[in-house]
Amino acid sequence: MPYFIDDFELSATSSKKVTKEILNSQNFVLYFYPKDNTSACTTEALEFAELYDEFRTLGFHVYGISKDTIGSHEKFKDKFSLPFTLISDVEKILLDQFNVIKDKKMYGKAVKGTVRSTFVFGEGLKLIKEFRDIKAVGHAKVVLDFLEDYTSK
């Protein structure tokens, strides 16, 4: 069953735009993360980067998305030579649609923040699997293992 996503157009690294129409025609992994250049987010990005060729071999694109600016994303991508596209969602368009903004505690204070989550889609925006509130370390491999099993059926 297709996942319902409103039309959108968001800026992405390498001067790209990402739209619902573009995603509709792809198999892809969309991983939401809190912030560029933080330890867990960097670990997660590096693990997806390390496995990127294997995701592509299985026919899946990888997109990272956060509420960071496009400038922040470009620096993050360049600093770590990330091979995949990072999407800037400053206005929280997709973050809200995917319900990944939640109340969190930071230094004892209640704040709203992005809950690390990953969604796997087939063409036509068919939701294959969602991973919510995950830990960064080892997560990319968990997603890859799932896709290897899924695509071998």
Image: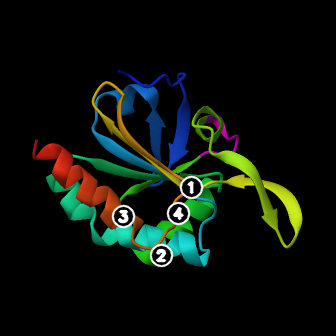
The residue to which callout 3 is attached is 140
Q: Position of residue 124 (x, y in %)?
A: 31, 24
The residue to which callout 4 is attached is 74
Q: Which is more toward the observer, 25 or 116? A: 116
Q: Tell me how far mark 1 sits from mark 2, CA to CA.
A: 16 Å
- Whichever of callouts 2 and 4 sits on the residue coming sooner in the sequence is 2
Specify the farthest residue to the right.
109
Q: Identify whether 51 is placed above or below 115.
A: below
Q: Which mark is residue 64?
A: none
User: What amino acid is labelled 3 in the image?
Assistant: Ala
Residue at position x 18%, y 54% in the image: 148
- Whichever of callouts 2 and 3 sits on the residue coming sooner in the sequence is 2
Q: Point out the stretch of residues depicted in magenta.
A: 89-93
At label 2, counting other C-alpha atoms closer than 10 Å, the crowd grade (few under 14, some 14-19, many 20 or more) is some
Q: Tell me how far mark 4 sits from mark 1, CA to CA.
A: 26 Å
Closer to us: mark 2 or mark 4?
2
Q: Position of residue 13 (x, y in %)?
A: 47, 54
- Whichever of callouts 4 and 1 sits on the residue coming sooner in the sequence is 4
- Whichever of callouts 4 and 3 sits on the residue coming sooner in the sequence is 4
Q: Is residue 54 left or right of residue 142?
A: left
CB atoms at circles 4 and 3 under 8 Å apart? no
Is residue 83 visible in this depiction of the protein?
Answer: no
Q: Tell me how far mark 4 sits from mark 3, CA to CA.
A: 21 Å
User: What amino acid is labelled 4 in the image?
Assistant: Glu
Assign a secondary structure to mark 1.
loop
At label 1, counting other C-alpha atoms closer than 10 Å, the crowd grade (few under 14, some 14-19, many 20 or more) is few
Closer to us: mark 1 or mark 2?
1
For the C terminus, the image quarter is top left
